[in-house]
Image (cartoon, rainbow, N blue to C red):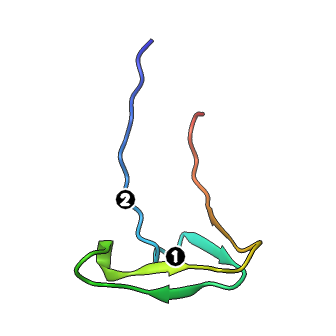
Amino acid sequence: MSFNSVQLKIDDTDPTLLYSGAWFTAGNASSEFNGTTHGTNTAGSTMTYRFTGTS
């Protein structure tokens, strides 16, 4: 059995990411990808990324 794989980087500010709940933005340009990050301290907050694949 063989598998094909693709590595994909998605930044936390990508518009295809759907955030729900209470999120904050922060960042450190020298240590984070594109200098951004999202975080939450609120239970129940979610982030959704939808994609189409075969499995």
Quadrant in which residue 16 is drawn: bottom right
* Left or right of residue 55, residue 44 in this image: right
In percent of the image, x 37 and y 53: which residue is there? 8
Secondary structure of residue under mark 2: loop
> Is the residue marked by circle 2 packed among few (<14), some (14-19), or many (20+) residues within 10 Å?
few
How many numbered marks does the figure carry?
2
* Left or right of residue 53, residue 28 in this image: left
Q: Which mark is residue 9?
A: 2
Secondary structure of residue under mark 1: loop
Does residue 4 sit above or below 10 in this rendering?
A: above
Q: Amino acid at mark 1?
A: Pro
Using the image as rendered, state which of residue 31 and residue 12 is in the foreground: 31
Q: Residue beneath label 1, please?
A: 15
In percent of the image, x 26 and y 84: which residue is there? 29
In percent of the image, x 69 and y 85: which residue is there? 22
Quadrant in which residue 23 is drawn: bottom right
Q: Amino acid at mark 2?
A: Lys
Quadrant in which residue 54 is drawn: top right
Quadrant position of the N terminus in the picture: top left
Q: Position of residue 33 (x, y in %)?
A: 31, 72
Q: Position of residue 5 (x, y in %)?
A: 39, 35
Q: Reading the chain from its start, which is encountered first: label 2 or label 1?
A: 2
